Amino acid sequence: MHTDHTLKVLEELTAILGHQLRFFSTEICSNYDTLELPKEARARRRRKSKKSPTELDETQGTAQHRVAYNMDTYKHHALGDYVQAIKTYGTCDSYSTEPVCMRL
């Protein structure tokens, strides 16, 4: 159960987390060359072969692509909305999104 104080602390810490994530994304991640996982490279190759199987060479698509930390995801976007959602709907353990079926 949240109180006004814990919600204020959550809001402040969420803002700090947002600043730290942006710093991590711009300052730290840019210093490292990161590659997709071999599993991701294989999945990308399979997807490409389904689109144009005649154009795909056996050696094509096996190299791992460079990837960067992605701040443009819903989980990052929604961080700022958690406090208001808790104030409006309560904590997520106090309600369910499961459909309710009435039996007569």
Image (cartoon, rainbow, N blue to C red):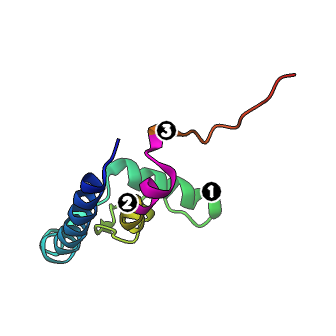
Mark 1, residues whose alpha carbon is within 10 Å: few (<14), some, or many (≥20)? few
Q: Which mark is residue 94?
A: 3
Secondary element at tag 3? helix
Q: Which mark is residue 50?
A: 1
Residue at the location (38% across, 47% down)?
Answer: 39
Q: Could you tell me how far apart the alpha carbons at marks 1 and 3 are, in whole angstroms?
A: 45 Å
How many marks the image carries: the answer is 3
Span of residues in magenta: 84-92
In which quadrant will I find the C terminus? Answer: top right
Task: Using the image, determine if residue 86 lies above or below residue 13.
Answer: above
Task: Find numbered disc 2 in the image and state the secondary structure of the residue it sits on.
Answer: helix
Query: Which amino acid lies under the numbered mark 3 shown in the image of this protein?
Result: Ser
Could you tell me which quadrant the N terminus lies in?
top left
Q: Nearer the viewer, mark 1 or mark 2?
A: 2
Q: Secondary structure at mark 1?
A: helix
Relative to residue 93, is residue 18 depicted above or below? below
Question: How packed is label 3: few (under 14 Cα within 10 Å), some, or many (20 or more)?
Answer: few
Which residue is tagged 2? 83
Q: Residue furthest right?
A: 104
Main SS category, magenta section: helix
Q: Nearer the viewer, mark 1 or mark 3?
A: 3
The residue lying at 22 percent from left, 58 percent from top is 9
- Extreme front residue here? 4
Q: Quadrant of residue 51?
A: bottom right
